[in-house]
Amino acid sequence: MRVLGIETTCDETAAAVVGLAEDGRGLVLSNEVLSQIAEHAAYGGVVPEIAARAHVEVADRLVARALAKAGTDLDGIDAIAAAAGPGLIGGVIVGLTTAKALALVAGKPLVAVNHLEAHALTARLTDGIAFPYLLLLVSGGHTQLLAVRGVGDYVRLGATIDDAIGEAFDKVAKLLGLAYPGGPEVERLARSGDPERFALPRPLLGRQTPDFSLSGLKTAVRLEAERIAPLSEQDVADLCASFQTAVVDVVVDRTRVALRAFQAIAPRPSALVVAGGVAANGAVRRGLQRLATESGLRLVAPPLDLCGDNGAMIAWAGLERFRLGLMDDLDAPARARWPL
Ligand code: KG4
Ligand code: ZN
């Protein structure tokens, strides 16, 4: 079984082909990504109209490349999946319409995939883990703790009440004058910073529901930066380190509370899973590894190229749905908002 996946919800145009190995795990046969970072960098963030146009320019070539690298053509594909949301609507329309056209021409079924579901199921592609598991989904647009009980069966235990964690990383980077996208930059500079120099808040720490709040932490970084301005390189590194450490403390505490809430609605989780762009952060991974060890659980974190947005996760979610008979009609809508 082989599925083509197309991802265009934000600033990455991506196409991939995944198959199924004998042991039931996924096989990434190709995974092509073209980042638009250069196009958006001058604006300090993603410009939706520029993103949609850039997707249009490269989508067809990227699909052709993904098929060629997988050693196949459309005839060798069983289903065509595209992220149908949530995301920037212009981009979503480009990817979904491309998939519909290919499905129509090749006479193949279409699977309209929820981008968040694709992040949620990536751990099954890479590690073949069983349901149920606890998922921490941390990206630029979303921060959620979910009990994943099956394909399409997600119970939200907690979520952010303001900014997403990736968004907080990006905003902190911007206010410190760092390059976009900010998450990797903050992590890089934090390595040479003092995580204890600034006493930043840990919002909602100890709260009995596993929700997040990041906007106060971001504001605290801004106030400290203004207080000690002009900032030296060391000041910036210390602010990055102090911010990242506060985020990790919050993430570990909130996830620990979610593990407790999990027990009320599902049997013991097979693993603690982290997904989304922020899952690439080493400090976040180390914090979650400590929690997993303390809880007697395995931590499953996707390899770095499958943490951020990519086509393989869309193809895999498409495959999971396709084999359950969950296909979509050609009038499947593109959705800017689509909660899991
Ligand atoms: O999942 P993703 O690629 O796109 C969305 O669906 O949002 O996540 C992108 C987010 C951005 O906010 C980016 O700054 C953040 O993930 N990110 C990181 C790191 N790498 C990416 N945040 C912290 N540390 C990183 N190493
Ligand atoms: Zn994403």
Image (spheres, rainbow, N blue to C red):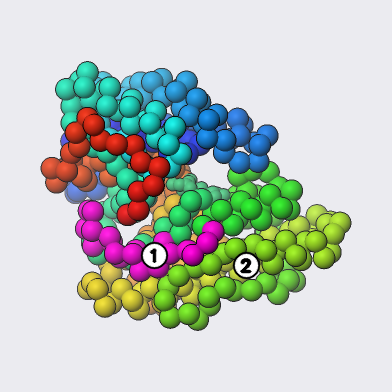
Name which residue type carries label 2: Gly
Name which residue type carries label 1: Leu
Q: Could you say which disc has been placed on residue 278 in the image? A: none
Residue located farthest toward the left when viewing the structure as drawn = 325
SS category of the residue bearing label 1: strand
Q: Is residue 147 left or right of residue 168?
A: left
Task: Between residue 283 and residue 115, name the one nearer to us.
Answer: 115
Q: Quadrant of residue 197?
A: bottom right
Q: Position of residue 17 (x, y in %)?
A: 30, 33
Residue located farthest toward the right when viewing the structure as drawn = 230
Q: Mark 1 touching mark 2, by CB under 8 A?
A: no
Q: Position of residue 205 (x, y in %)?
A: 53, 77
Q: Quadrant of the C terminus?
A: bottom left
Task: Between residue 62 and residue 7, name the one nearer to us.
Answer: 7
Which residue in the protein does label 2 denote? 216
Is residue 79 among the parts visible in the rendering?
no
Which residue is found at the position 41% from the left and 20% from the top? 61
Q: Which residues are magenta?
A: 144-163
Q: Position of residue 47 (x, y in %)?
A: 57, 35
- Alpha carbon of mark 1 to alpha carbon of mark 2: how far? 20 Å
Q: Quadrant of the N terminus?
A: top left
Residue 161 painted magenta: yes
Which residue in the protein does label 1 denote? 145
Is residue 59 among the parts visible in the rendering?
yes
Mark 1 or 2, which is nearer the eye? Answer: 2
First-in-chain label (1 vs 2): 1
